[in-house]
């Protein structure tokens, strides 16, 4: 085939593909077995769409994830007999009397968004200060190279390297099982109902005299810390073990609401999980939570000291989960018998040519009675 013939062939193919029209051919198979299988398949698909997607999953409703805010307030006092023991908040000077710790001492920091930390165990390093080691003949092997060379109540001779004196003591354990926390929570679903607003407590209720036992009292948001730990679904969940090494616990407040039903069905549910460990962790890597912070002070000579505290405790994270559902506009606008009335009320026509707004055919004074018929 020469160049001219190839060109003509390509042109004919292009013309045929461009200007042709295809129509599907339907073949009716008159076979009872094929027909029954086909109708069964249609019924299965229709049953899944209606039964699961629409009825069970409530596909006829619009949904929105919960939006809300959480505030917390902890209460509890720990009596600690510091006589001859390790004092805390006393600049590491032994006291001869008892020590009382309140939330200002063990809630660190005082406020966090959607969470709070309770210190339950500590190690205290007393009277740390910076200085220089005593100089001596550099030919000698005794040198101060860092904090590891400094021991309590001793002097290390070296070549002028800064040393940090240490004296580690175990601080008081805080028995926080019966401490209580007030967890206030408000929620809303503005995309579904701008007027909807609900709280996990009753405004005119007596919160001072209630403690949530987690059984049948969803509107008393005062919890003992031990009760929250007992809600943890996985092991270990013993409060004493968690208090010794620390832990991270998430308290979930679940709101699943159907706004087509009474608000009595829209109630909070509480559950908890531990986040710092998993079932796959080994004994040497079994979770825990701790951090260090320091308190600085000056002696009478103006020398700065610090008390270093390694704090162990339980970090509680409060998380909101859930959603609300309401009857979809699609049902009202396309299924209901008086859908044309709802359509006229919902939509407003704007005429761009004469800058006028078209009014609904319904008279506003008749709108209510018509919709309620």
Image (spheres, rainbow, N blue to C red):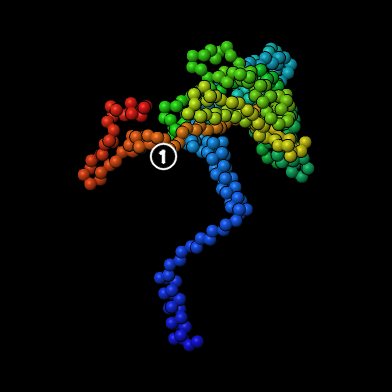
Task: Please provide percent x and percent y for residue 65.
Answer: 51, 35
Q: In this image, 170 relative to 184: left or right?
A: right
State whether residue 265 appears in this view: yes
Q: Name the residue under label 1.
A: 334
Task: Please provide percent x and percent y for residue 302.
Answer: 59, 25
Of 20 and 279, nearer the camera is 20
* Residue 151: quadrant of the picture: top right
**Residue at 73% from the left image edge and 30% from the top image edge:** 235
Task: Please provide percent x and percent y for residue 134.
Answer: 71, 35
**Residue at 76% from the left image edge and 38% from the top image edge:** 282
* Residue 132: quadrant of the picture: top right
Task: Please provide percent x and percent y for residue 124.
Answer: 69, 26
**Residue at 52% from the left image edge and 22% from the top image edge:** 264
Disc tally is: 1
Residue 229, compared with residue 280, is above or below; it is above
State whether residue 301 appears in this view: no
Label 1, residues with CA under 10 Å away: few <14, some 14-19, many ≥20: few
Q: In this image, 190 relative to 280: left or right?
A: left
Of 29 and 86, nearer the camera is 29
Q: Is mark 1 on a helix, strand or loop?
A: helix
Q: In this image, 214 relative to 60: left or right?
A: right
| Quadrant where the C terminus is found in the figure | top left
Q: Residue furthest bottom?
A: 2
Of 291 and 360, nearer the camera is 360
**Residue at 60% from the left image edge and 50% from the top image edge:** 36
Of 346 and 101, nearer the camera is 346
């Amino acid at each position: 085939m020469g160049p001219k013939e190839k060109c003509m062939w390509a042109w004919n193919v292009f013309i045929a593909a461009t200007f042709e029209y295809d129509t599907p051919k339907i073949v009716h198979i008159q076979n009872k077995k094929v027909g029954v299988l086909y109708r069964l398949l249609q019924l299965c698909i229709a049953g899944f769409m209606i039964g699961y997607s629409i009825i069970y999953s409530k596909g006829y409703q619009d949904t929105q994830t919960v939006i809300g805010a959480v505030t917390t307030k902890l209460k509890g006092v720990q009596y600690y007999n510091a006589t001859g023991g390790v004092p805390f908040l006393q600049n590491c000077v032994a006291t001869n009397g008892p020590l009382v710790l309140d939330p200002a001492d063990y809630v660190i920091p005082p406020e966090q968004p959607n969470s709070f930390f309770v210190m339950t165990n500590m190690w205290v390093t007393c009277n740390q200060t910076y200085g220089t080691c005593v100089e001596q003949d550099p030919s000698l092997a005794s040198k101060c190279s860092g904090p590891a060379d400094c021991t309590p109540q001793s002097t290390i001779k070296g070549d002028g390297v800064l040393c940090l004196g240490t004296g580690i003591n175990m601080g008081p354990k805080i028995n926080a099982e019966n401490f209580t926390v007030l967890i206030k929570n408000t929620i809303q679903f503005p995309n579904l109902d701008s007027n909807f607003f609900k709280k996990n407590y009753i405004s005119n209720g007596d919160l001072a005299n209630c403690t949530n036992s987690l059984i049948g009292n969803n509107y008393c948001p005062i919890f003992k810390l031990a009760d929250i730990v007992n809600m943890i679904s996985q092991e270990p969940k013993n409060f004493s073990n968690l208090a010794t090494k620390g832990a991270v616990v998430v308290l979930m407040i679940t709101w699943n609401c159907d706004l087509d039903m009474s608000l009595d069905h829209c109630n909070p549910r509480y559950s908890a999980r531990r986040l710092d460990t998993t079932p796959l962790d080994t004994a040497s890597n079994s979770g825990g939570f701790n951090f260090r912070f320091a308190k600085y002070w000056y002696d009478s000579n103006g020398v700065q000291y610090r008390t270093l505290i390694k704090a162990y405790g339980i970090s509680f994270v409060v998380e909101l989960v859930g959603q609300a559902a309401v009857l979809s506009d699609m049902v009202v606008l396309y299924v209901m018998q008086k859908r044309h009335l709802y359509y006229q009320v919902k939509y407003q026509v704007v005429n761009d040519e004469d800058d006028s707004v078209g009014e609904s055919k319904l008279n506003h004074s008749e709108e209510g009675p018509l919709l309620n018929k």
